[in-house]
Image (cartoon, coloured by chain):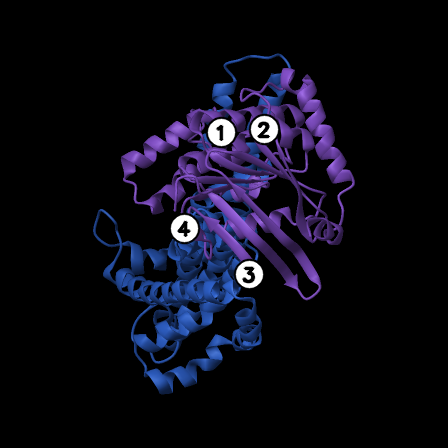
């Protein structure tokens, strides 16, 4: 928003007669955009509040109550951050697992994807296996992981890694296969050693596809994180949710769900910000095509 | 090896992409140090295959490619290449300066030398102030200039140019031709230049090599005895130029297939 405003302000210095209505339009569309984006969720929450108060159901506390409970549970800590030890414990252990599993998925997925994608024969060989494994729902493997890896973090991280590797792997294979042969030949003709060709040509060239895969896998990792914490766990947001439900603390349960929603939104937002920076060249190149 | 040995020596080069699809039948020629050699031929005559064989990007079926006394079996270290498709050969994720500098990192140069060479070669092609632009922010002609700068910064013993100006407009093309001619004369760089444009081939070269239709053979080597300094207008209107271009055109037009060349050679 700031950039839209400052953009209009600097352009308003030159006053072309015909430009005035256009400037206003631009400003209006910018402001409208923000208002509409904020308005929809606000209206939704207000409707929810009205419905919950009117319904007065034990199972559906109004959002105001959930918000207060969230504050009490997690955001009433000491200044300057106001977070409570409970939040640090719940989110900390959850995010730790998620990032560990997701990180393994990204590193392994990209590495395997490059190895597979570089060779037509290998990719054709591996393709059906990858698609078969990918179609196995991650949660269905929890019993297997429990038997093999026990009930601690290793099991959860492995589950998250296994479940979220597929989008990264498939997109990496795809991205590497789609690289222009001229780019690879340029690297060879100028004597770049193979390691440099991988890190300076293959990975950047495949990056748009790889990033799309990583973004999907982030969402999958979040889901698997919660699911893994619903089974024999001692901490994490999933554990908090389950405990709340079992002790009939329904407002706590809803607070947990809301916290997860916010977390998912923020993770995706953070990822988008990084992606915009890393793939700035890609957007630019496509616009100039 | 004596000093008079050719820089590039190709003997009986033969390449088939598969049974029955022979791209190069039998090509033999050599290029002396500091010479500008143009290669022309009918379209699809295996010129790109020839270039890739010299660049070590393709393992040819048989024959010998010798650069600086070394048989080419992999990519030679003293060779740079300018591709036809600049938009795909420049890396869109790197700025112009970084594109030029990237190959230098693997030539054992320190940062200062790399920066200096990058700046020098960008200035040589008239892009001294464009190092911080992305390739896609520049026009096609400027992109090809950047690709030339990348090759110049490499300080190659042999510069390969594969139809480098095929996808730019006529005026840009003339400018780029003069740029390459200037580079050749001032740096004394040995250049092998593939083109399908006869005027361009004659205008730039010390020697024109005419290839036959695919599978290719060398039809004729024509020495271009025009003055070293060339001009788009006066050179091209000189009778010597006109005679040469007609000679080349006739050879290409009536380019025999490889069998009759073979018969003529025997």
From the top left corner, tell me how far across and down residue B178 is, in percent: 56, 24
As drawn, the label of residue A133 is none
Of the two numbered discs 2 and 3 in the rendering, the one whose residue sits closer to the viewer: 2
Q: What is the CA distance from the residue labelled 4 to the residue labelled 2?
A: 30 Å
Q: Nearer the viewer, residue A78 or B248?
A: B248
**CA distance separating discs 2 and 3:** 43 Å
Give the labeled residue for mark 1: B184
Is residue B134 or residue A82 the one in the foreground?
B134
Colour representing chain A: blue
Check disc 3 and report its element: helix, strand or loop.
helix
Q: Would you identify the image quadrant in which residue A243 lies?
A: bottom left
Q: What subunit carries mark 4?
A: A
Q: What number of labels is visible?
A: 4
Mark-to-mark CA distance, 1 and 3: 42 Å
Whether residue A73 sits left or right of residue B172 in the image: it is left
Picture disc at residue B204: 2
Looking at the rendering, which quadrant does residue B242 occupy?
A: top right
Helix, strand or loop status at disc 2: helix
CB atoms at circles 2 and 3 under 8 Å apart? no
| Same subunit, tags 2 and 3 | no
* Residue for badge 3: A174
Q: Which dot marks residue A192? A: 4
* Colour chain B is painted in: purple
Residue A15's place in the image compared with A190, above or below, is: above
State left or right for residue B258 relative to residue A11.
right
Badge 2: residue crowd in 10 Å (few <14, some 14–19, many ≥20)? many
Residue located 61% across and 17% down the image: A19
Does the rendering let one see residue B127? no
* Mark 3 chain: A
- Looking at the image, is mark 4 or mark 2 nearer the viewer? 2
**Is any part of residue A236 visible from this angle?**
yes
């Amino acid at each position: 928003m700031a950039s839209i405003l400052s953009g209009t302000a600097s352009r308003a210095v030159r006053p072309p007669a015909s430009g005035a209505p256009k400037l206003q339009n631009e400003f209006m569309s910018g402001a409208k955009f923000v208002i509409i984006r904020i308005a929809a969720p606000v209206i939704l929450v207000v409707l929810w509040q009205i419905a919950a108060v009117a319904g007065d159901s034990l199972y559906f506390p109004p959002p105001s109550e959930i918000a207060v409970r969230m504050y009490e549970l997690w955001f009433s800590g000491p200044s300057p951050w106001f977070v409570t030890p409970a939040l640090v414990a719940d989110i900390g252990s959850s995010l730790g697992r998620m990032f560990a599993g997701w990180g393994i998925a990204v590193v392994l997925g990209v590495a395997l994807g490059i190895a597979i994608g570089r060779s037509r024969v290998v990719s054709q060989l591996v393709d059906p296996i990858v698609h078969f494994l990918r179609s196995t729902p991650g949660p269905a493997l929890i019993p297997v992981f429990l038997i093999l890896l026990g009930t601690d973090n290793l099991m959860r991280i492995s589950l998250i890694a296994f479940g979220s590797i597929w989008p990264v792997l498939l997109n990496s294979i795809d991205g590497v296969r789609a690289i222009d042969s001229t780019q690879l030949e340029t690297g060879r003709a100028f004597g770049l050693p193979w390691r440099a060709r991988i890190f300076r040509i293959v990975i950047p060239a495949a990056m748009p596809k790889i990033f799309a895969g990583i973004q999907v896998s982030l969402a999958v990792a979040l889901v698997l994180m919660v699911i893994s914490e619903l089974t024999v766990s001692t901490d994490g947001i999933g554990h908090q949710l389950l405990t709340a439900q079992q002790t009939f603390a329904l407002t706590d349960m809803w607070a947990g769900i809301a916290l997860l929603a916010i977390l998912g939104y923020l993770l995706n937002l953070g990822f988008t910000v990084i992606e915009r920076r890393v793939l700035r060249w890609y957007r630019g190149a496509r616009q100039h095509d | 090896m004596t000093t008079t040995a050719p820089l590039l020596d190709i003997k009986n080069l033969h390449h088939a992409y598969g049974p029955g699809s022979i791209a190069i039948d039998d090509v033999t020629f050599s290029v002396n140090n500091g010479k500008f050699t143009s290669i022309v031929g009918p379209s699809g005559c295996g010129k790109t295959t020839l270039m890739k064989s010299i660049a070590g990007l393709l393992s040819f079926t048989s024959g010998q490619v010798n650069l600086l006394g070394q048989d080419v079996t992999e990519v030679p270290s003293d060779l740079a290449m300018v591709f036809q498709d600049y938009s795909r050969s420049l890396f869109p994720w790197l700025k112009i300066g970084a594109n030029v500098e990237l190959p230098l990192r693997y030539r054992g140069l320190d940062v200062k030398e790399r920066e200096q060479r990058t700046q020098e070669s960008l200035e040589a092609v008239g892009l001294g102030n464009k190092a911080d632009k992305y390739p896609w922010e520049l026009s096609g002609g400027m992109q090809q200039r950047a690709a030339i700068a990348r090759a110049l910064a490499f300080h190659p013993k042999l510069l390969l140019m594969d139809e480098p100006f095929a996808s730019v407009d006529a005026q840009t093309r003339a400018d780029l031709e003069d740029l390459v001619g200037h580079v050749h004369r001032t740096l004394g760089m040995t250049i092998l230049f593939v083109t399908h444009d006869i005027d361009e081939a004659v205008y730039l070269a010390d020697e024109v090599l005419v290839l036959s239709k695919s599978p290719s053979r060398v039809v004729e080597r024509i020495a271009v005895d025009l003055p070293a300094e060339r001009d788009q207008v006066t050179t091209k209107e000189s009778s010597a130029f006109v005679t040469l271009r007609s000679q080349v055109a006739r050879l290409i037009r009536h380019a025999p297939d490889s069998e009759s060349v073979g018969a003529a050679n025997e």
